[in-house]
Image: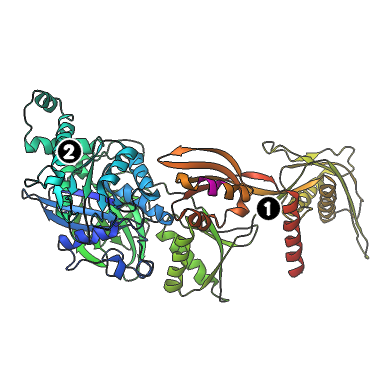
Amino acid sequence: MKGIDISNVRNFALLGHTGSGKTTLLDALLHRLGVNDRQGSPDNGTSMADWTDEEKSRKISLWAKPFRMNYTTRDGREMGIMAVDTPGYADFNGQVIAATAAADSALIVVDAVAGIQVETLRAWKRCEELNISRAVVITGIDRENADFFKLLEEIQNMWGNKCVPMVVPAGDNKSVVDVLAAEDIPDDVSDLVTKQKGELVEFAAETDDALIEKYLAGEALSAGEISAGLHGAVHDVNLVPVFALSSKAGTGIDELLEGLSFLMPSPLERPVKDVEGNDVEVDRDAPFAGLVWRAMNDPFVGQLSFVRIFSGTLRANSEVHNVTKGEKERIGHLYFINGKKQEETETASTGDIVAIPKLKHTVLNDSLCAAGSSIRFAPIEFPRPVTAYAVTAKKEGDEEKLATGLHRLADDDPTIHFERNNETGEMILSGLGDMQLEAAVERMRSRNNVDVALNVPKVAYRETVTGTGEGHYKHKKQSGGRGQYGEVYLRVEPRDPEDEDWFVNAIVGGVIPGNFIPAVQKGLHEGLRRGAIAGYPVMNIRVTVYDGSYHDVDSSEVAFKIAAERALTDGLSKAKPVLLEPLMKVKVMVPEQFMGDVTGDLNHKRGRILGMGAEDGLQVIQAEVPQSETFRYSSELRSMTGGRGTFDLEYSRYEVVPPNITQKIVAEAQKQQQEHG
């Protein structure tokens, strides 16, 4: 930030469960620091942060968005603040992951009434994974049924006594008391404040040998020593400060800003490493190095790349090196983004998040650096999709618009994937949940003028055999002129998936000439695409061709190809064929009170419970579930748990379908074959 010492820059992400008050807090900060002339609110559509049409209509945040503010501390220091608001809905967790990769620290926002929720726990876990400093902000202390001290106890039980209040509410919850700075302390919190201040001084002393000696000797630590000590404790995550406030009333906002200013680390204190684990010099005078942590299509500017500058200074009208792509990029304009507002700047430096329009080669996760440099950062790892739909254009002729729209959705959000399933012929749109995909489709409808239908995808079933079967076919055709002749005998049997040798040529005596064997294999390949039960591809079988016959004149490659394909169909039908379905590994994370409902539902879905345990304050259920039962699981789990359950999903293997389910699948396949002739 221009004119502000880098040691006075604070770069943090706002994390927490949906409805916890993250965006409301940000709106309060923007108003308090003069970025907005009035305090916006997500509830009435005036939020400076939730400014898109989709966010206004849903009244939740959908995107991670950076904001830039300045603050003058009580002792006169000029602070630069970069705050990144994030969604709290599980479907948009990819935005949280991206934002925390771009931030030096985090504020975990907890609603004073709702307390610790699933995404609160996930936010803490993300901070633990990155080992970044954090603070807990308890919002809505003036709401009915709010109990700050009960919630503080729950937080300490969950995450330990290193969670210590810096600001506490006074008795009427209409005001707050700064534990370190307060002078006139209300009687109802006097004892508590004295106790907490003593704990904070002890935390400060423990960060430095000289301070601990002074403390143990009974000497009082100066205010500067306490501040420096607490700063070090927060940096090392030995202390997690807790703040109390009411964003709507503006209570506690100044105390939070003051606390962030002296407690949280600056960009200079964040260890930065390249993709190989080497230290990167962090300094404004060092060569520029940054990572594209988010990309979006702005309706007015076009493609915008959001870059976190980890080191050096970036200038407008300059040239940088895209290390990831090995390409040069011309930087035209630079913008600081505050909601809809775009403030053009000539320079941006270490700790800043800046938006660059219309880069030719650069996409999400690309590393940019100064020309002549080669610093490359590890790419951000995003979660795998867990929800999928088959997507089709409602209007004939809109297929090209649909393809363009899907590309844009994937460019905007790395957790949205799309691909054409070659087996089912469907275009599959997948993501982290129903709400994410529904919002994406709405965005595509308005942006690309294409209306789409979302349907449950078809399952890519397979077929195999459980026994041995002999197959035979003689292809003989005479219709004037040269005829067609080829005869094949073969044996079909199960094959271990790890054994790659699926074809055995056991022909002796030249009953099938060697020059026709490739045609036989080609016919077998064709036959493996359509099994004997419902016409699904065949896997894990071995085919041994052991006999046949040919004609000196009429035999041909085509004849042996047809004979092999039909002999395979004959052999498959006699080898006890079975239908296979894909199984998915499912990891469900829910509060304990929902365990019975969730396990019962998984059993109803033909799931197999593999294990249960506790993780990060939640109960975890490991299971295997047929893919056909998982397509709507995102909305079903949300309904079962009131939005407090989450899950991860990945492919496991194929397994035999029970006979009663097989009958239904076969009947449906036959019906579709009849409908399509």
Residue 597 in magenta stretch? yes
Which residue position is annotated with label 2? 196
Image coordinates of residue 549 in percent, x first then y, are 91, 47
Residue count near mark 1 (Cα–Cα under 10 Å), binned few <14, some 14–19, many ≥20: many
Residue 444 in magenta stretch? no
Pick the front one: 423 or 599: 599
Label 2 and label 1: CA atoms lie apart by 62 Å
Q: Amino acid at mark 1?
A: Tyr
Image quadrant holding the C terminus, namely bottom right
> At x 16% / y 31%, what residue is drawn?
202
Which residue position is annotated with label 1? 461
Label 2: element kind: helix
Quick one: label 2 or label 1, which is nearer the N terminus? 2
Image coordinates of residue 659 in percent, x first then y, are 75, 50
> At x 37% / y 61%, what residue is drawn?
62
Secondary structure mostly seen in the magenta stretch? helix
